[in-house]
């Protein structure tokens, strides 16, 4: 159970595959457009920690670490990353990952394909913490060696200064974080971005908000560009608003950021139809999850319009969802009192 | 920052050239007076062009009195709305301006709230019975008005005056009748607002809840969840569809779609039994359904469908044409009702159980009060006004017959008090046996006033006067008149408005492009060509049959809840209301794009 494909039953066990892979598995198994891939399970992570002796070494280092010392945290991060990069997998694990990667390549046509290697963390007792964007993602990896190295780099990202601080803040020890890793066919993204099935600004549940820019979604997720912004009404799926962003740079597979030509910057990176198609997918994902979700997507350059939207990730939205769940509203027993209260609220500061 | 941006004060508003002295035409309390200047200057006044889209003749100013008496009585004194008194009213350069009067002192609000609780409670508990009683009162008032008649004074009193020992002139009924008309007019305007403030208040509970649960929801979406789909406000148009269908079924399609003057159409119909049966059906439909103003019925020169049968015939012709072309013209009331329920339930689904309960309660309350909000205009602005103006026209005809006025338009150049005096003069002079003493006096004055009116009607309307508030919060101003903080800013020219694009209130979703047709008067509706965008100061729901021709609607005024907005949404036609100036800025033939979701109007 070191590697699990998205379409396998075991892929629905969050403890085994982490939040990101669980979302991908749900989407894959409901027939939604997801790039194919597999997950290196949390069991593989634990096995590696045990076999390589890294578990106790990290444990010792963290025990004496000053949680608030910036320099100390950064030194720990560097040391742990080095340990992960040097420590090859045990042979059984390495063989299984190679086999899974080979199988993914043959599913995609036979040649050695580029993949994205993405962290998929989970932690018990961390209900409500999204861990969104805390851990690393690598795109454009090619060949078993590169894939293997970046799986270990994803594991190492459980111990960056930033992610450890986030874990502690949420009452979780970094050692308790279970790191699965998703290996997924890289999308040839013409454009990509993030979709919330609510308005992140106001929390409006009847809105779907999409932010997108050219190339891979890194630039949007990392806040490196001002993306185009689309607001779609969840009910009726009408495009309510679109705002042109600057979209100054784009990432294409594996390469460094490059500048986008002025002509393309002046155009919206998604067509209205694509924005609405995305929103339709978002709405059905929210229904499936029974709560608002936060979705990463890409528009594949190789696929035909109408079938070119690829979902990369789907996570429950936490900030507004918790507030909405906790919101209370008074029933109306006495209309006069309700009208009075409502009128007075308008005049009082 | 400069001084707070403001509009002109009343005393800074120069009269249009040729309209000097307009003030003397109206009752003094409708006109700004020097001693009230500082209070007037400190407040914010906006044009009530929804009710009076053109400069108002002296007699027609009775509407401004009656409407704002009605609001005041009910808001300030009867129901005691805690946070608002009435709306103050002034005539400026012939237009009507109003000013909401919020109550801001917490102690006063508290005192009013205590009174309000009991009174509002009574209305909400007995809403349906009180609404039924309201309709009865309205119909009774209409009957009283219908019973009034005006006839020229005879040389000798009829014999029964003597034989039955009346001891008074039979012609005294002219004086009584005039007073009765005025009294009933003021009564029905008090009835008009009897339940309206409470109705809006109840709707605001739902509105506010939706705004909080869904902060970005469009006003029109909230309205769509509540608006009635079967009320009597749709009946006049439905009658046109019914008549078109009956006509086409009876093989009269070619006659009905040929168009032409009503006399010609009816003459041709008279040639066949089927045609005569159809005409009888048409005649039966006229009362009450064609007692329907193409505009809002506040000006004596506005016509009802009954006054100008070309309007309903044209509507019938349009529907008959579509029927002949094989289209289905049935109003899909069942489908609309279903869509409305689906819309509400989709929003409800997004809420947690506690929120969903309040949503249900508030929606139910809104839907209970909404028939009143939507239907009261039919009783008041259409049915009552139709009778009122018809009777005033009778009076005018009589005054011409007895030689007091030269022309039937003369009467409207006197305000209601002056007319009362003129009637007294006419009757007393007749009784005494001398020529009416005011004939010459009034002829000179009427000639002067005709010039003033012509000058006032040439001038375009100024949207507002005085000092605007930081934020417009008055629910009447916002909901009914479409006067929002953003609109006021646009009026002040603070926001980017290059003339190539401007914004109004989005009233019915959809984006459409097309050539403009500016329509200032219902008579021009016949000019509309298929595919055009109708641009008008206001639109009335009675324009519905014209809506089957145009692809979009833009108006100068009106809010989300104006009937035009409701009807446009129903017909799935993009609409932008409350643009302030669209009918002045746009020219017939110009190509524009309108976005009914954002309120943007762009010249292409």
Image: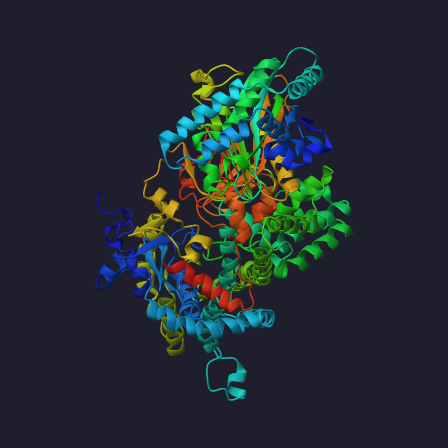
Q: Residue at x 47, y 50 (%)?
A: B559
Seen from the viewer's position, the closer of residues B282 and B533 is B533
Q: Is residue B404 left or right of residue A96?
A: left
Q: Residue at x 53, y 62 (%)?
A: A330
Q: Is residue A160 left or right of residue B332?
A: left
Q: Is residue B358 visible?
A: yes
- The image's colour scheme reads rainbow
> Which corner quadrant holds the N terminus of chain B?
top left
Q: How many marks?
A: 0
Asked where in the image residue A253 lies, by quadrant, the reply is: top right
Q: Measuring from the top left, give residue B349's x and y in whole percent.
A: 62, 49
Q: Measuring from the top left, give residue A153's x and y in whole percent.
A: 52, 22
Q: Is residue B540 visible?
A: no
Q: Is residue B420 left or right of residue A220?
A: left
Q: Is residue B146 above or below residue A14?
A: below
Seen from the viewer's position, the closer of residues B549 and A216 is A216
Q: Measuring from the top left, give residue A102's x and y in whole percent.
A: 68, 15
Q: Is residue B20 above or below residue A15?
A: below
Q: Residue at x 68, y 30 (%)?
A: A28
Asked where in the image residue B408 lies, by quadrant, the reply is: bottom left
Q: Measuring from the top left, give residue A113's x and y in whole percent.
A: 63, 14
Seen from the viewer's position, the closer of residues B70 and B166 is B70
Seen from the viewer's position, the closer of residues A8 and B8 is A8
Asked where in the image residue A266 lies, by quadrant, the reply is: top left
Q: Residue at x 64, y 27 (%)?
A: A39
């Amino acid at each position: 159970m070191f590697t699990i494909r998205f379409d396998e039953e075991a892929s629905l066990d969050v403890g085994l595959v982490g939040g990101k892979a669980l979302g991908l598995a749900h989407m894959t198994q409901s027939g939604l457009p997801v790039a194919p891939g597999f997950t290196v399970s949390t069991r593989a992570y634990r096995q590696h920690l045990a076999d390589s002796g890294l578990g106790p070494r990290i444990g010792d280092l963290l025990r004496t670490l000053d949680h608030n010392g910036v320099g100390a945290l950064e030194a720990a991060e560097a040391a742990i990353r080095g340990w992960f990069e040097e420590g090859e997998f045990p042979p059984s694990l390495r063989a299984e990952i190679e086999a899974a990667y080979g199988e993914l390549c043959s599913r995609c046509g036979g040649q050695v394909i580029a993949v994205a290697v993405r962290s998929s963390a989970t932690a018990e007792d961390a209900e409500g913490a999204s861990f969104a964007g805390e851990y690393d993602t690598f795109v454009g990896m090619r060949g078993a060696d590169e894939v293997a190295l970046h799986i270990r780099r994803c594991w190492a990202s459980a111990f960056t200064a930033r992610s450890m601080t986030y874990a502690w803040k949420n009452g979780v020890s970094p050692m308790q974080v279970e790191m699965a890793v998703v290996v997924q066919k890289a999308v040839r993204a013409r454009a990509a971005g993030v979709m919330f099935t609510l308005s992140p600004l106001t929390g409006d549940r009847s809105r779907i908000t999409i932010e997108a820019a050219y190339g891979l979604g890194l630039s949007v997720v990392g806040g490196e560009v001002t993306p185009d912004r689309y607001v779609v009404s969840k009910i009726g799926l009408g495009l309510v608003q679109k705002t042109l962003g600057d979209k100054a740079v784009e990432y294409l597979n594996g390469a460094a950021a490059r500048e986008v030509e002025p002509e393309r910057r002046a155009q919206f990176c998604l067509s209205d139809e694509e924005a609405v198609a995305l929103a339709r997918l978002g709405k059905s994902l929210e229904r499936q999850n029974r709560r608002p979700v936060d979705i990463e997507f890409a528009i594949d350059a190789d696929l035909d319009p109408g079938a070119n939207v690829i979902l990369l990730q789907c996570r429950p939205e936490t900030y507004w969802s918790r507030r909405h769940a906790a919101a209370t509203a008074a029933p109306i027993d006495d209309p006069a009192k309700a009208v009075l209260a409502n009128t007075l609220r308008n005049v009082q500061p | 920052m400069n001084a707070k941006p403001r509009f002109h004060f009343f005393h800074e508003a120069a009269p249009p050239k040729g309209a000097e002295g307009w003030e003397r035409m109206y009752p003094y309390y409708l006109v700004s007076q020097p001693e009230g200047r500082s209070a007037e200057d400190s407040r914010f006044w906006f044009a009530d062009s929804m009710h009076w889209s053109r400069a108002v003749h002296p007699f027609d100013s009775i509407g401004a009195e009656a409407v704002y008496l009605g609001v005041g009585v009910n808001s300030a004194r009867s129901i005691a709305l805690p946070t608002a008194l009435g709306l103050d009213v002034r005539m400026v350069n012939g237009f009507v301006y109003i000013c909401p009067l919020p109550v801001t002192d917490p102690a006063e609000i508290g005192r009013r709230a205590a009174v309000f609780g009991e009174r509002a409670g009574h209305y909400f508990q007995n809403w349906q019975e009180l609404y039924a009683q309201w309709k009865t009162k309205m119909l009774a008032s209409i009957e009283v008005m219908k019973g009034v008649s005006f006839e020229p004074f005879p040389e000798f009193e009829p014999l029964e005056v003597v034989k039955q020992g009346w001891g008074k002139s039979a012609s005294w009924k002219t004086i009584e009748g005039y007073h009765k008309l005025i009294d009933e007019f003021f009564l029905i305007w008090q009835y008009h607002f009897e339940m309206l403030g409470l109705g809006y208040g109840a709707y605001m509970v739902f509105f506010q809840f939706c705004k909080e649960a869904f902060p970005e929801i469009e006003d029109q979406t909230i309205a769509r969840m509540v608006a009635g789909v079967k009320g009597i406000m749709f009946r006049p148009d439905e009658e046109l569809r019914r008549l078109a269908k009956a006509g086409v079924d009876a093989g009269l399609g070619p006659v009905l779609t040929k168009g032409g003057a009503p006399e010609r159409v009816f003459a041709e119909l008279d040639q066949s039994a089927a045609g005569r049966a159809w005409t009888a059906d048409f005649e039966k439909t006229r009362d009450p359904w064609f007692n329907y103003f193409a505009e809002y019925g506040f000006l004596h020169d506005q016509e009802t469908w009954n006054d100008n049968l070309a309007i309903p015939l044209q509507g019938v012709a349009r529907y008959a044409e579509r029927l002949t072309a094989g289209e289905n013209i049935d109003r899909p009331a069942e489908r609309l009702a279903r869509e409305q329920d689906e819309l509400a339930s989709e929003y409800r689904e997004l809420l947690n159980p506690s929120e969903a309960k309040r949503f249900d309660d508030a929606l139910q309350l809104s839907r209970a009060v909404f028939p009143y909000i939507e239907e009261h205009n039919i009783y008041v602005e259409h049915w009552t006004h139709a009778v009122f103006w018809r009777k005033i026209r009778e009076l005018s005809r009589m005054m011409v017959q007895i030689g007091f006025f030269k022309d039937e338009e003369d009467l409207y150049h006197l305000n209601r008090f002056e007319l009362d005096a003129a009637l007294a003069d006419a009757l007393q002079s007749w009784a005494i046996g001398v020529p009416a003493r005011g004939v010459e006096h009034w002829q000179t004055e009427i000639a002067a006033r005709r010039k003033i009116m012509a000058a006032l009607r040439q001038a375009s309307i100024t949207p507002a006067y005085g000092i605007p508030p930081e934020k417009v919060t008055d629910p009447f101003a916002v909901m009914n008149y479409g006067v929002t903080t953003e609109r006021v800013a646009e009026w002040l020219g603070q926001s980017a408005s290059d003339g190539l694009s401007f914004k109004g209130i989005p009233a019915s979703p959809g984006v459409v492009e097309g050539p403009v047709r500016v329509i200032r008067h219902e008579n021009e509706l016949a000019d509309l060509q298929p595919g055009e965008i109708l641009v008008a100061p206001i639109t009335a729901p009675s324009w519905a049959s014209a809506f089957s021709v145009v692809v979009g609607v833009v108006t100068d005024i009106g809010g989300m809840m104006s009937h035009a907005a409701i009807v446009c949404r129903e017909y799935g036609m993009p609409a932008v209301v409350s643009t302030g100036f669209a009918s002045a800025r746009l020219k017939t033939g110009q190509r524009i794009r309108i976005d009914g979701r954002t309120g943007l109007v762009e010249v292409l």
